[in-house]
Amino acid sequence: MKLLAWMRSLAGGVFRRTRIDNEMEEELRSHIEHRADDLERSGMARAEAERRARIEFGGHERYKEECREAIAGNVIDILLKDVRLSIRVLRKSPGFTLVAVLTLALAIGANAVAFGVLNGLILRPLNVPQAETLYGTEYGDGSGWQSYPNYIDLRDRNRSFESLAAWKFVFVGLDTGNDPIRATGFATSGNYFDVLGIKPHLGRFYHSHDEHGPNSAPYIVLSYGFWHSKFQDDRSVVGRVIRINRHPFTIIGVAPRGFRGTLLFVSSPEFFMPIVNQEQADGWSALNARGNQGGVFDAFGHLKPGVTPAQAIADVNSVGDYLRRTYPSEFGRTKSSLSRVGLSAFGRPARAFVAGLMLLAGMLLLAACANLGSLFSAHAADRAREVALRLALGSSRRRVLRQLLTEAVLISAAGGAAGLLAGVILLTRLSTWRPFPGAPVQLPVAPDGSVYAIALILALLSGLLFGIVPLRQVLRIDAYQVVKAGPSGRPGRRLALRDVLVAVQVAICAVLVTSSIVAVRGLVRSLNGEFGFEPRNAVVACVDLATSGYTGEQVPDMQKRAIRAMAAIPGVERVGLVNNYPPLVYAAAGRANVFKDDTTELNTSNVAGTPYAYDVSPGYFAAAGTRILAGRDLNWHDDGRALPVAVVNQTFAVRFFGSISGAVGGRFRRQDGRRVEVIGVVENGKYMSLTEEPQPAMFSPFLQSPSAQACLIMRSSREPQELLAIMRGKLRDLGAGPPTETGTWDSLLEVVRFPSRVATVSLGVLGIMGAMLCITGIFGIAAYSVSRRLKELGIRLALGARRKELLHAALGHALRLLAAGSVAGLALGVLASRVLASIVYQATPRDPFVLASVVVIMFSVGLLATWIPAQRALSIDPLRLLREE
Amino acid sequence: MPDQAQLLPGTLDLLILKAVSLGPLHGYGILLRIGQISGQALLIEQGALYPALFRLVRQGLLKASWGTSENNRRAKFYELTAVGRKRLREETDGWNRLAAAIASALAAKPEEV
């Protein structure tokens, strides 16, 4: 009943506000007139009677205010009044308002972006039904790669998954009738769409029962995007025959609109095809190669009801144990786990990166709150006189506090809105950004409702957080003392809450600055680092001869002709060929098991090492710029008819043979039993990632193990685009088909540099934000300190203080806080940077350069932030100041 | 008026309810009535009456309507609602119990302890 009445008056209050106000006014006036009537009757003149009546009534406005509060409907009324007053107050100090809003906008923007990334990469499930019970399997080394026969065993032997689907990437030449194009597709198991539980937009999907052995299901399903752009939504495409690498495939359906494949980081594939027809797409068959870990990129399925992830892991591991016992020479991995579908092998680094980002953004928000808290506290102290006057005129402390809190919330709303806007713009741009022209990589971080909600909540929470900092201060104000003596009082010598806040904020900012310098320094080093080859002045063109229908002996013949043709281009100094991809490009390096020469049983327990394995042409090292340390390069006689030979790198030589010189002439065995003689040793390099430790690698002659997919490396100082155009022409003339991948080696390295670059840019931006926050924080405290002690400084100046003493008195406090905060922050930052070392290549905090630049930056920050307050302190005119007081 | 006593907190509401229970009154009338029935012994700041009135109306203990006063002026008249009447009874009982208890406590003599 009471609640109902309150709600009714609340609702009514909004509309009847002016009427209620008028009525209230009339009632109070009526009271005063009745009283005046009485006084008049006792013989007083009317005018005097009315005056007396008003005095007797007491504080007219104050009682009206209390009446308003007594009516619940005035909550909104008071709020509006508070808001109006707050806006007036804030407009009167635009500098303070601007600094506060900007500070918060920075922090909220950073958090919106960090949360957007978290949301897009980790929280948001794949766009399929019941994505939460969908799990991928990993085999031990953190990637989902496994061979197709192993997948089949896992699918049939596990007891945890309802059904297990698998897929791998295929890059093919697609001929729809006119010009063949390069297209990216998913070769999937027959049950892929059934496991995902999605329905086709058009036509039908293929199923398990369509699989009848190798190349038995020549069906293709188009992705919605490809159907839309390539076939202009033509519904009659179903049933049409198109060619994949010259093999006919029938279009049987179109995937639904929102389905973009099962890997978040890549843009939608153009088509889906049965994995049993993989040989036609790849040019080699993965279906029976148990040792080939590239057969399946990712396997996943729904867990059976009641099966926990832990049980499923144990189950997958038991299948793994069975496989290792049964196929000791072909199954090398040890332990398995489950991953989230959509992130696959990228899950762990993505989570680490996002966690770091969230942590730093959170710190930024904390620093901003500390900053705003001290700003608000200083602001409130400056307004002590105004507050005291309001208290003296009958305002309640609650009302004053509420008004201060309204100011804080207004600022947080404005800052939050600005930050969110910036964050959303950034996220939207990121989500449409294709970092690499050649690779279908994307960041699925488009903002959604939860990003807006989180930013809003964070803004309001932080507003309340820094809004209550001046609480105690206002409660302590003695209106009488302040009005009488002025707000200056005595500058407190003890450590105020405000000082602690500033020091904390400076410390957090110093951590951010330190981490960002460590990261940037690491990136600079990694850009100038030793790759073991020289990516500058080198262009790469990859050719997949399988897509043009070459098989067997035709492949190396065509590759030899291509090398000769390239070498004939004027300005080309060196040409080499490397199978699959060159080091660091697309991180697609394969590894191979090697054994000691005297090993007889070639199974996993006797493996002596698993170096990266490349097949290269003679002249590759010269073209790549890799130095030969001992022995000789490969030559054209090292072909299938000659004895198996290899060039190994320094790490391989030292680990396997003890020294570089001892390696030349040494022998080892490969998995297939071949004895390989080492003919040369080259310098170490990076093969998979920039952050890897030195790894063993071996280079075999490509003529001894031909591969249809290979890349030509050309060293030339000619303009790369011009050179690439000539190359494409030559390859076409030869009949080698269009190259799959072209570019300078440097630009192809962007992919490996990408993670550290993203990490560095985000850290760098956060560091700059930290420095900016630090400036506003120190500026706030310094300006406050000067304004508060203006009178004291004036007297000192009048008594003959020198400029230096004056500055010391005015700013010493702020600078001491800066120094204390910086030292704490630097120490913390050095600790935090150990974590960074895992993400950013060669990031080390124990670097004099880092320490020196942090000190210099914090010093400049202090100089910059105290400049204006210092100018103000120096320009004090004691005469004017004392006169005004 | 040196003999006037300050109101105990919370007693103003009770006095208003009592005053109005004797017949509908406007604000100034309530003030006069309290003065009259308390023998001018209680000091009420005039303006302080109104926040209390608004509060009692919101709580549903009083209802208000505009009318014409004995001075021929427009005034807002207050009267008790059923809930207000019940509340007045309860509060009066409570007050009496409290007053009796305090009076008896204060009347205690050493020999009685």
Image (spheres, helix red, strand yellow):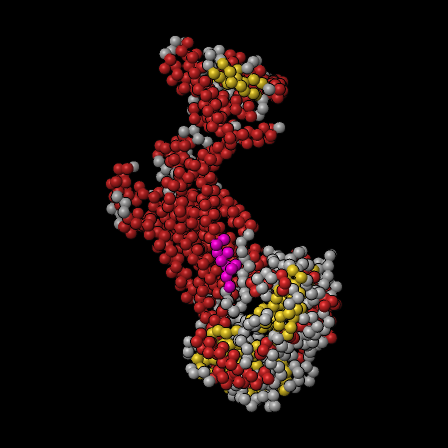
Where is the C terminus of chain A found, in terms of image quarters?
A: top left
Where's residue A49, x and y in %?
39, 14
Up the image or down, A632 lies above or below A473; here it is below
Q: Nearer the viewer, residue A454 or A23?
A: A23
* For residue A819, side relative to residue A670 (left or right): left
Foreground: A553 or A699?
A553
The residue sitting at 61% across, 74% down in the picture is A245
- Segment colored magenta: A424-434
Q: Which residue lies at the image location 66% right of the left edge and 56% below the top edge?
A: A129
Count of number-bearing discs: 0
Query: Does the magenta segment cover residue A426?
Result: yes
Is-magenta flag for residue A99?
A: no
The quadrant the N terminus of chain A occupies is: top right
Q: Position of residue A880 (x, y in %)?
A: 25, 40
Residue A167 visible in rendering: no
Vertical side of A539 occupied by A376: above or below: above
